[in-house]
């Protein structure tokens, strides 16, 4: 463990020497839910030699509230602390490019009181690729079943990472990146842009630019899911 931390210390110091980007400190304007890439130490201070509060399991979801030089300040299981960036970004270059919508750090603010904006609007979304439907809104939750590409579901936005899906009177969750086109109505299904209060402003550019290159499904049939395993085919009017 000590050897691992020494290597980590070397990597972070080496990265610091490469760019002034890592010297930035700011508070995210919109708290972001994200999974850690491996077991991660939750530190009391943004210093690699600082005391470790606990170890966050691999793939566990944390809420990022601040960027502090080479650390992210996160909330996990109602504990606030600092995690080195390499546990949340795949490499230094990715971290260097991150520039989340932000504001100056509010010293003394209560990071545990993280509240996502509420979006009470009902939406309908078309699954863009086979989508795992989960019991809870996190990647570590049980995958109950999958919905095929092209399925249209009734949903509401849960947070920056998940949609709340309503199927057969039950509530499930689907990751935002599995939902392609969205609409405020199901018949007709008219694709529109989502700009609600839980819109992830940073990732939006990537999603929208990727979607422009996806083949259009206009003119094809589609399915509407009312409950798991029950699909009702709907043909477009000609």
Image (cartoon, rainbow, N blue to C red):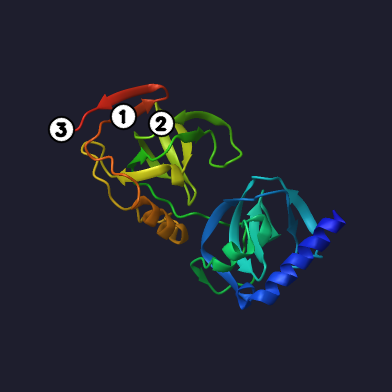
The residue lying furthest to the top in this view is: 230
Residue at x-position 63% and y-position 76%:
19
Q: Is residue 8 left or right of residue 91?
A: right
Counting from the top left corner in percent of width and height, residue 41 is at 75, 55
The span from disc 2 to disc 1 (Cα, nearest Å) is: 9 Å
Q: Earlier in the sequence, mark 2 or mark 1?
A: 2
Question: Mark 2 near mark 1, Cβ–Cβ under 8 Å?
Answer: yes
Q: Which residue is mark 1?
A: 223
| Image vertical order of residue 226 relative to residue 44, above or below | above
Cα distance in 3D space between marks 3 and 1: 14 Å
Of the residues under marks 3 and 1, which one precedes in the sequence? Answer: 1
Residue at numbered disc 3 = 237
Report the residue at 38% width, 57% height from top: 209
Asked if the residue at tag 3 contacts the one at tag 2, i.e. Cβ–Cβ closer than 8 Å, the answer is no
Q: Local crowd at mark 2 within 10 Å, few (<14), some, or many (≥20)?
A: some
Residue that label 2 marks: 148
Question: In this view of the protein, which residue sits in the foreground, 47 or 130?
Answer: 130
Q: Are there few (<14), some (14-19), or many (20+) residues within 10 Å of tag 3?
A: few
Which comes before the other along the chain, label 2 or label 3?
Answer: 2
SS category of the residue bearing label 1: strand
Quarter that holds the C terminus: top left
Q: Farthest residue in the right direction?
A: 2
Viewer-closest of 163 and 115: 163
Q: Give me the C-alpha separation between circle 2 and circle 3.
A: 22 Å
> Which structural element holds mark 2?
loop
Does residue 45 show up?
Answer: no
Q: Is residue 157 visible?
A: yes
Q: In the image, what residue occupies the spot 46% across and 61% down?
A: 202
Above or below for 237 versus 77: above
> Residue 139 at x, y = what percent?
58, 41
Left or right: 43 in relation to 141: right
Q: Residue furthest left?
A: 238
């Amino acid at each position: 463990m000590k050897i691992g931390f020494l290597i980590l210390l070397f990597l972070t110091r080496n990265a610091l020497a490469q760019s002034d980007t890592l010297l930035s400190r700011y508070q995210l304007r919109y708290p972001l839910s994200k999974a850690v890439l491996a077991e991660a130490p939750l530190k009391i201070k943004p210093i690699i030699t600082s005391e470790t509060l606990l170890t966050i399991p691999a793939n566990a979801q944390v809420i990022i509230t601040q960027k502090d030089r080479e650390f992210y300040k996160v909330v996990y299981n109602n504990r606030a602390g600092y995690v080195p960036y390499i546990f949340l970004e795949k490499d230094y270059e990715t971290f260097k490019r991150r520039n989340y919508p932000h504001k100056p750090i509010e010293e003394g603010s209560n990071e545990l009181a993280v509240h996502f904006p509420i979006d009470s609007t009902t939406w309908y979304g078309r699954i863009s690729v086979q989508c795992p439907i989960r019991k809870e809104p996190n990647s570590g939750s049980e995958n109950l079943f999958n919905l095929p590409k092209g399925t249209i579901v009734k949903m509401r936005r849960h947070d920056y990472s998940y949609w709340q899906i309503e199927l057969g009177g039950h509530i499930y969750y689907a990751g935002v990146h599995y939902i392609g086109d969205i609409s405020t109505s199901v018949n007709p299904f008219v694709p529109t842009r989502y700009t609600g209060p839980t819109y992830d402003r940073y990732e939006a550019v990537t999603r929208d630019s990727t979607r422009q290159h996806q083949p259009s499904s206009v003119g094809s049939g589609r399915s509407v899911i009312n409950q798991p395993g029950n699909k009702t085919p709907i043909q477009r009017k000609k």
